[in-house]
Image (spheres, rainbow, N blue to C red):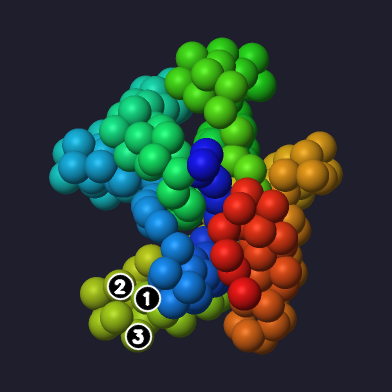
Amino acid sequence: MQGVLITIEGIEGSGKSTQLLRLSEHLRHLELPLVVSKEPGGTNLGRELRRLLLERHPSGEAWCADAELLLFYADRAQHLETVIRPALADGRIVLVDRFEDSTRAYQGASGVGESALDRLSDLVLRGLRPHLTVLLDMDPEVSLQRVEVRNLAMGPEFAETRFDDAELAFHRRVRSRFLAIAQNHPNRVALVPARDPADQVEAAIWARVAPLLRSAGFRVD
Ligand code: TMP
């Protein structure tokens, strides 16, 4: 049996982690062969890349856009080679927190052009596409506020991680790019309104995941 690749996408604070946990618990409960992973950071070396990409360097130096793009794809190439492709070949369900669409949405919103994205995508993905992408959609004004509340709850040292107007504008661009991807790939992408109560969001996700798994030969009832 060939495996199934399911990715989950959305802007920060859209409830991705909660829903990923709920879905993976549901699949584990059904005793299905499951691999849960994420990008960036789904491998040992990838976790180093994640740190380099997401933590501010003490020197204040930041990656230029091209270097950042290549690092996200380096993480993805390693992840595909050592985790995703072997698990799919082994007939497993692979559930990934962020994948290619995040690069298209985030690096696209930072100004990287479509042709660079297409070329790297061809090189690294070699035609592999998720069978299903769950896109949790939410207004960034609401989702970023959730992140701020979460950061504050972590302690006063996190209080400075507040989003300014430029960041809000950036996340608005990211959201529009995600929505455009959903519009251009209606068969692959399930657009799920993420402001609904978590149980409702979970049910909407399951309504898309269950038929896919059933058609791939997994027992989901
Ligand atoms: P996370 O904590 O939700 O995994 O977020 C990782 C951050 O990395 C998030 O801000 C989105 C960003 N990101 C990109 O910019 N490009 C990518 O290709 C990926 C996978 C993540």
- The secondary element bearing badge 3 is classed as helix
Residue 75 showing in the rendered view: no
Residue visible at 38% across and 54% down in the picture: 35
Tell me if residue 19 comes above or below residue 1 in the rendering. Answer: below
Q: Measure how far apart labels 2 and 1 are at the Cα level.
A: 5 Å
Amino acid type, residue under disc 3 in the picture: Ala
Tell me if residue 58 comes above or below residue 158 in the rendering. Answer: above
- The secondary element bearing badge 1 is classed as helix
Q: Do the residues under discs 2 and 1 have CB atoms within 8 angstroms?
A: yes
Q: Position of residue 122 (x, y in %)?
A: 55, 16
Whether label 1 lies within 8 Å of ligand 1 gets the answer no
Q: Do the residues under discs 2 and 3 have CB atoms within 8 angstroms?
A: no
Residue to which mark 2 is pinned: 158
Amino acid type, residue under disc 1 in the picture: Asn
Q: In which quarter of the image is the C terminus?
A: bottom right
- For marks 2 and 3, give the one nearer the viewer: 3
Q: What mark, if any, has residue 3 been given in the picture? A: none
Amino acid type, residue under disc 2 in the picture: Phe
Residue visible at 66% across and 21% down in the picture: 114
Q: Do the residues under discs 1 and 3 have CB atoms within 8 angstroms?
A: yes
Q: Earlier in the sequence, mark 2 or mark 3?
A: 3
Q: Position of residue 55 (x, y in %)?
A: 27, 49
Residue to which mark 3 is pinned: 153
Q: Measure how far apart labels 2 and 3 are at the Cα level.
A: 8 Å
Tell me if residue 91 comes above or below residue 73 in the rendering. Answer: below
Residue visible at 42% across and 69% down in the picture: 31
Residue visible at 72% across and 69% down in the picture: 207
Residue to which mark 1 is pinned: 151
Q: Where is residue 124 in the image (x, y as percent from the top left)?
A: 46, 21
Disc 1 residue crowd, few under 14, some 14–19, many 20+, Cα 10 Å:
some
Q: Which of 137 and 150 is in front in this view?
A: 137
Is residue 16 shown left or right of residue 68?
right
